[in-house]
Image (cartoon, rainbow, N blue to C red):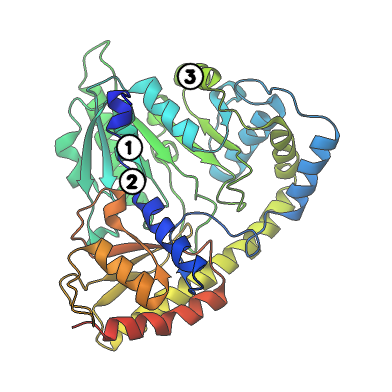
Amino acid sequence: MNVSVLASSLIGSEIIKIGNEVNDLKSKGAEIANLTIGDFNPAIYPIPTELKDEIIDAYNHHHTNYPPADGILPLREVVKDLLKDRFKLDYEANEILISAGSRPLIYSTYLALVDPGDKVIFPAPSWNNNHYCHLTSAEAVAIDSLEENNFMPVASQLKPHLKGATLLALCSPLNPTGTMFTEAQLAEICDLVIEENKSRAAGEKPLYIMYDQIYSLLTFGKEHVDPVSIRPELRDYTIYIDGISKCLAATGVRVGWGFGPAAVVSKMKAILGHVGAWAPKAEQVAVAKYFKNATQVDTFLTAFKDQVQLSLNEIYNGFQDLKNEGFAVDAIEPMGAIYLTLKIDYIGKTTPAGEVLKDSADVNFYLIKHAGTALVPFSAFGNDENMAWFRASVGGCSLADIKAMMPRIKKALSELK
């Protein structure tokens, strides 16, 4: 069958490939700690009870028709208050767009700003920017971030590439690393964007920042920072991505919000109106009511973050113990999100069966089969396949699963030559 050039050139998800391998082994009775997908097992991390009750109540009150294309006004007003109270950001309801999670917002940001051939800059590793560039026929410029900067991009790396670019895609806390910008790091980047935009001719398309802060309420002793709070003059050039998917363990509830300059948000609204990617009305009604009670939100977040951090710390401490025993591993201390950055430097080693682990994917599949542990190599996020770093996502595993996993990893690694 002949399909479009776009469809025929799409790159399959390495995460899905790993997931299929995991599911196949599980169906045969294998015990696997699945640290692949950035999702939550509802049996371990249920959504807030009050939110669930509000969703049921909204359906019982027949909120089953189409919502407005930009989201119901009560929710946009609640988001407006949330931004002011928690982030000191001042946006009006017409500068806020509700959608079915963050993905439609990211895609509509690309479609609203990026023309075919436009340059888009993003760090590697980062989630899906390479694919969004492909979908919009943009020129993708991936900047390899460095271990010494916790895999966050820094101004000195970005500066040579900003001339003529249309979009700078940033995320903090970052998927896949769980690391975050410091205020100083982000301020330097913001100053570069301001300088670049001042250099452009009248009528020339500016350089925009897309700032994905979907994990902003999931931080561990670190302060979340954002561009407009640091440099208010970037308000006309920054589009934010946020929502409930991660902070409320509500990935399947599908309520996200973007906000930014009204002229851009209105175009994003028009694009999503054609796609029909709005959040279900009942869920919007429920989220608006839930977030009005800041105390119940904070109560949930405190317990939820403690639970996530326990699992992240368990893996981090386990890998530090292995490192101290002489294993070629490392880990970066968890800062935010549900991810941990792990180094497993065993590319080139030989398995007991005599097979050479040629790249990070081989190392990963070895751990799946011999340690009952499934990770995602950074090659799935835009890095080279010879990079020995991996993402561990704790949302799908219990603390008991993680504790049982660590001895299996130690045994499997000790058997490599």
- Sequence-wise, the earlier of marks 3 and 1 is 1
Identify the residue shown where x is 49% and y is 50%: 215
> If the image is split into quadrants, where does the C terminus sit?
bottom left
Vertical order, 215 against 254 (above or below): below
- Sequence-wise, the earlier of marks 1 and 2 is 1
Disc 3 and disc 1 in contact, CB within 8 angstroms: no
Q: Name the residue under label 2.
A: 186
In the rendering, at what x and y percent does residue 212 appear? 43, 41
In the rendering, at what x and y percent does residue 399 appear? 55, 74
- Sequence-wise, the earlier of marks 3 and 2 is 2
- From the viewer's side, name the closer residue of 188 and 340: 340
Amino acid on which the number 3 mark rests in the picture: Ile
Q: How far apart are marks 3 and 2 (CA)?
A: 30 Å
Q: In which quarter of the image is residue 179?
A: bottom left
Which circle, 3 or 1, is nearer the viewer? 1
Amino acid on which the number 1 mark rests in the picture: His
Q: Residue 158, which numbered label?
A: none
Q: Name the residue under label 1.
A: 131
Q: Residue 271, which numbered label?
A: 3
Identify the residue shown where x is 26% and y is 54%: 379
